Image (tube, rainbow, N blue to C red):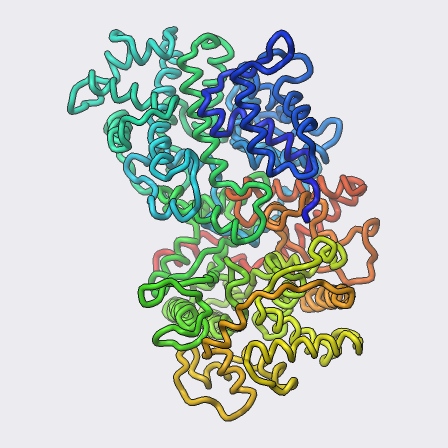
Amino acid sequence: MPGPVDLAYLRAACEAFPLASEASHRQVVLELGKTPTLVLERRTQRLADELEAWIRLRARGHSLDSLRQVRDLVWFGEDARSVGMADYLIRLAARHLMHRGGHVALRTEPSIDEPLAHFRWLSLLLPPDLLVAARSVDMPTDPASDHVDTSTPHLAKLLEQGVAETHLHVGAAVSFHLVWIGLMTALSRHPPDRKKLARGGEPPFGMVDRFLRMLQAASVTRLLLASFLWRGDRLGDASSFDGFVDDPDGPLATQIAPRAAWPAGPHDFIRACVQALGVTVNAKPSPSVAVMASVHRHLLGASRWSSVKTTEELLCADPVSAWLGRGGAMASAETRFARRGLRYLLDAGRKDVGFARAFWQYQRIRTLTFRYLTVEPGTAGLGWFQHHYDRISPMRACIDGARFDAAARCSGRGVGLSAVEMRTAPEPAWASVRDLIREAAVPSFVDHGRPEVGLVLHFLKQGSCSHAGRKMLSADPGQLGHSCRFGSFSFARLKEASAIEAALAHQPELLVVFRGIDVASDELSVPAWVFISPFVKVRRAAHRAAARLSRARPGWKVTPLRATYHAGEDFRRLVEGVRRIHELLEFGLLEAGDRIGHGLAAGVDPELWARNHPVTVQPAEERLHDLLWEIDRYKAGDLPADATRIEQVRAEALGLTHKIFGSNENPEHLGAARQRLHMSSVLHYLGYPFVHGRIPEDPIDRLVYRYLTESQVFARGQEPLKIRTSEGEVRMLVRAGAWLRSEIARREMTIEVNPTSNLLINDMGAIDTHPAFRFQPLSNRFSREEEPIQLSINTDDPISFATSLGDEYAYLYGALLRSGAGAHDALRWLAERRDDGFRSRFTLPASRDPNIVRQLRRR
């Protein structure tokens, strides 16, 4: 069972709830209050009741009374009886943030370690740029950026140069404020795809159509609020927001509506605007999305949205930037708009209830969208994460033209970015692969401060597929035309590998930017042997391209691409995670100098894991693979022989073999069949991924053939087994973990550490327990008996985990300080990880050369 949740998370959840919950939107909360007898006012009590209902399943280990104490402390402070939302947000920001020149930074007094732990949770529950806007209200100028600077002065110096981002998925490598600006600017012309949204689970407000209505209403409300604030800012207009909207002699009626050229006339346009505000404030059922989209387009006037190619184009396309301006080092128009709205509510608009309703309800729609795209703490496992990841694509579709530029700039936020590797899936046509690699060259970085840029193409695992009009598991051998496990899936990956091969043959110069291959997504759904042939094909093509360039372009110093592989992050049993990592080394998918994505299983404490997982459930065939792998380790001398353990494992493996294959097989043949399954020559001999030949005569090849083709073997192998963790298995895992770590270290391999991603997907409770500290121990925490493993620190999916590269370094810094390390040792440890990341990068210095990049994109 998981332990108690971090109290810092529960405190952050209470802080965010009045600003970022459907309950606060439904109740149109404008203030929090207590009666003279110190009980919550009726409306505030209703909000508190909904908070308790929401937090009940997330508060394991904490009593209801303790949660109420935390709630009252963060809602009211020590003596407040009532507080309006503007004052509440200003106070919340001041509690955690401070000014640092033109930037907003995390408070470092009296220490930095605890504020970092708390802000990690708060920034997952509330958009940090809203906190930046609130903290900058009393600054003389607009803030210089949208993010909170989490680095201390010494850490910031450490990160000024030589920082590499080596694990970044392009699909989620964008800041939330850019996604929001894209939606608010282009929603009426390019709405998100409803079917794709439906795949991501339940959205805010319950249904996809209702969510899209609220987004469209928010886009209209945003323009009306900005127009009102603009008049006060530029013209000194002192009217209320209701007067601005409803007054027949007001600006909306006399100036905006006539210019909108609404077909039904100005009065009908005003009515549609008021109705859109009603949707934002009270979720009223009318008008329709189509009407509100038309209102939005008419408010924009002659402005025409075109596909943006850079983040700068996106920010300039925002209509609010026409009022607030754009240029130089400053936050986005959205952050500055929020800052002016808060200043108005604290000053001239303190009694403007109409503005307050529209402003706060707009902000709640925005914060709920943020929460929709951000992984919620407590939803562990890659399966749950996939739901979150599926939500991003339709929401950022309108700014996809700027995806590589946005990814590179997102990585460089707050650090001296020297190299960035961006990951995305390949296309099945070689010309599309070529164009994708050219696009990844990021032209906007050519002329100023360009880091080394690389593209890693990853093959995506898929647990199911649509075949002959019906959904089936990718592993099901009953696939027409293939008649073997993963037949259609493997054929699709081979097509992608062939497209990459052809692209490199046509234009070997692509290797300047195309720097690696990877396997990602649903980790447990597809075994490693499926990817051996695609890896071999792409590696050979890259070696040929590098050889051609060594003769044609010797000055570019282009080397063959390298590989990484997501493994050891998701596992049903710890031995399964350890096995899946080692198989990459055992069967040559990864070579010296390559990297392992996440690799957490190699650093998990087996004794702690066994205490938390005394009994687990696993498919029968996966259990058999684990046992065969363990037997092979004893045979190879990798693990010390334990006669009792060996006999137990052999007996269980034979029993499972009889259960799955329906026959008694030679024990020696089982291990040999596992080895041959991972040989591309054997798979080719059998005709894979089309297996229609005669049954092999060799008994070992026959086992492989039966495993690949027999539906009954497949079905019996999928039967779940309840497995109890024994003391003998724990002892084996302790030795296997140490041995595996030494194997990784001696091969010059690097593990890609993604602190927040690992924290949430593996439900660690706190970054303090991250396996990174076992891979690279400090002398005062673990012994130095093992050779340390190189680690690179990365973000993985910035929007999903509300993070940046600088933030990830800062969160590890806080964990080191909380462990008892001094600042000197902690900074030295981080400096070594920075160097590990830069040394293990796949990118090339040639990718920084503007002339080479232009030549690559022109050819």
Choose top left, top right, bottom left or bottom right for residue 750.
Answer: bottom right
Q: Position of residue 556 (x, y in %)?
A: 50, 63
Q: Nearer the viewer, residue 273 or 850?
A: 273
- On screen, 763 above or below 210? below
Q: Nearer the viewer, residue 3 or 334?
A: 3
Q: Nearer the viewer, residue 526 or 415?
A: 526
- Residue at 48% x, 31% y: name it: 367
Apparent side of residue 115 relative to residue 704 in the rendered image (left or right)? right
Q: Nearer the viewer, residue 216 or 553?
A: 216
Choose top left, top right, bottom left or bottom right for residue 640.
Answer: bottom right
Apparent side of residue 225 relative to residue 422 in the rendered image (left or right)? left
Apparent side of residue 215 relative to residue 265 in the rendered image (left or right)? right
- Residue at 44% x, 25% y: name it: 26
- On screen, 335 above or below 529? above
User: Is residue 476 visible to the viewer in this orientation of the structure?
Assistant: yes
Choose top left, top right, bottom left or bottom right for residue 184.
Answer: top left
- Residue at 77% x, 62% y: name it: 787
Q: Position of residue 37 (x, y in %)?
A: 64, 9
Q: Quadrant of the C terminus?
A: bottom left
Q: How many marks?
A: 0
Apparent side of residue 425 relative to residue 835 in the rendered image (left or right)? left
Q: Position of residue 607 (x, y in %)?
A: 76, 57
Q: Position of residue 620 (x, y in %)?
A: 58, 70
User: Is residue 140 visible to the viewer in this orientation of the structure?
Assistant: no
